[in-house]
Amino acid sequence: MAEDKAALGLAMRFVDEAGSGKRGRGRIELLEKIAELGSISAAAKALGLSYKSAWEAVEAMNNLSDTLLVERVSGGRHGGGTVLTPRGIQVLAAFRRFEEEYSKFLAALRSNTEFGDFYQMIRGLGMKTSARNEFLGRVKQVKEGAVNAEVVLDIGGGQELVSIITNESVRNLELAVGKEAYALIKAPWVIVTAAEPAMKTSARNTLCGVVSRCQEGAVNGEVIIELPSGKSVAAIITNESIKNLGLREGVPACALIKASHIILAVPA
């Protein structure tokens, strides 16, 4: 039962507080279609989404989960595709199992302490930001200085993000070791290198992986770096930089992020 509660709590991250928002319910439907069709492109087509939008939704869900919900597979009769992980199947099953009781669940949420832990999770997804990158993590360390504090956030997979915020923000957000928090990073703030940088930089955070998608626009392009944990970082850089760095799918790359460019947030 404890596993069911945890899986449902995670599913609730993908549904807004009112239960009627397209963003959340659309993500649950996307998980369903991926499970049914075994392909993100087929799932996107079935739901009337662009391939890019579908991948962005998948990347966001994986980043907000402690364990990957969706992963690529290779080989097989059809040459590979995309499937739900056991955790993804569990989350989807938990959501559908409780969906008929959803309205009662929301009412119970306000009066029954058994459901209290889910409330913050639901409100967390209701938060809408302009940040392309959203990571859910747990505070590992808080070190206050004279004015600012250094907060280390464990985002899973052996990876951490370090943020510099004011001491006042630490108090306002009630940040403490063990507390869950979101790290928000705008894509234009992410610096990309073609491989692990040989020189020292002022960027406190270095996340290395492999380019999974690279799409050029009129002037700038979007580069998605998949990390070893399966989570991903999106960066917006110029088309010229993409060419100069030789960025394309499968090329090793690193995302450099200044600690001052990481915004921390907690559910209200």
Image (tube, rainbow, N blue to C red):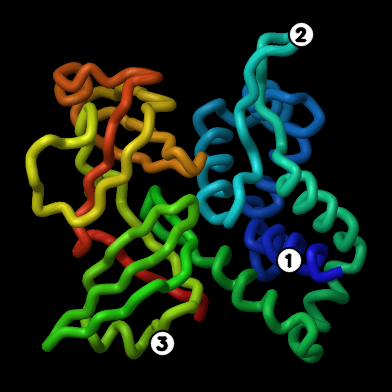
Q: Secondary structure at mark 3?
A: loop
Residue 151 occupies quadrant: bottom left
**With respect to residue 12, does 199 lie above or below?**
above
Three-letter amino acid code of the residue under disc 2: Arg
Task: Kindly identify which residue carries mark 1.
Answer: 6
Task: Kindly identify which residue carries mark 2.
Answer: 77
Left or right: where does residue 35 sit relative to residue 40?
right
Specify which label sits upstream in the sequence, 3 or 1. 1
- The image position of residue 32, as x and y in percent, is 77, 39
Task: Kindly identify which residue carries mark 3.
Answer: 174
Three-letter amino acid code of the residue under disc 3: Glu
Camera-nearest residue between 246 and 76: 76
Left or right: where does residue 126 sit relative to residue 256?
right
Q: Quadrant of the N terminus?
A: bottom right
Left or right: where does residue 67 sit relative to residue 229?
right
Three-letter amino acid code of the residue under disc 1: Ala
Dot label at residue 194? none
